[in-house]
Amino acid sequence: CILNRVRATDEPTTRRTGVMSKVAPNRPVPDHVAGPLRAALEGIGLPLVGIIPEDDALVSRRVVDIARDLDARVLSAGQMETRRVTRTAVGAMTAPNFIQHVSVGTLVITPGDRADILMAACLHELNGKPLAGVLLTGALEPPPAVQTLCRAALDWGMPLLLTPLNTMEAT
């Protein structure tokens, strides 16, 4: 149940309402499920006001949340306020092998001196497959020449973060 503040007059009042969550997306909620829930809620004075589908995007953390939790330095904010992390991948393999393990929504975690992984992530981004972002570890900032090569992907919106943590601590 969700507690809502309602302002019908100048004085705010509290109104309690019920919301059903984690239902199968794009499918109607069967009456044998919604009916008893609606009756139970209304029996205690809580009308059912909404049904929220199960959606990974609703529970996946944003890059900005991870940056805040790790106290990471933001090298390029990009779309960190809206990009969601649906999975993580540690960049420890060579770039051709690593890129096979990356998909849309992946937060790439790799040492800051792995320019090959950073550039592969940028190419992935520029090929229309947006990552959640890249977290560079070990307080190792990429050299200016590498950052210049990555500029197009960063301007496209890919967040780039830096943490002093080692890769294992950051995962």
Image (cartoon, rainbow, N blue to C red):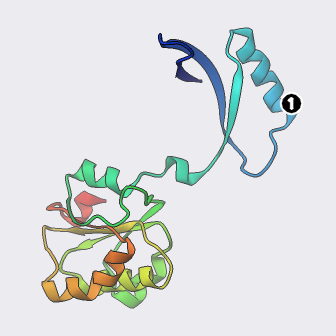
Question: Looking at the rendering, in which quadrant would you find the N terminus?
Answer: top right
**Which x, y percent locates residue 127?**
48, 85
Question: Looking at the rendering, in which quadrant would you find the C terminus?
Answer: bottom left
* Residue at point 47%, 66% (across, down): 105
Label 1 Cα crowd, 10 Å radius (few <14 / some 14-19 / many 20+): few
**Which x, y percent locates residue 91?**
33, 76
Quadrant in the rendering for residue 141: bottom left
Q: From the viewer's perspective, is residue 76 above or below residue 2? A: below
Q: Secondary structure at mark 1?
A: helix
Q: From the viewer's perspective, is residue 104 above or below residue 44? A: below
For disc 1, the marked residue is 32
Q: From the viewer's perspective, is residue 35 above or below residue 60? A: above
* Residue at point 33%, 50% (across, down): 65
Q: From the viewer's perspective, is residue 75 above or below residue 66? A: below
**Which x, y percent locates residue 6?**
54, 19
What's under tag 1, amino acid-wise? His
**Which x, y percent locates residue 148?**
22, 86
* Residue at point 72%, 47% (across, down): 24
Q: Is residue 119 left or right of residue 61?
A: left
Single out the residue that lies furthest toward the right: 31
Quadrant in the rendering for residue 144: bottom left
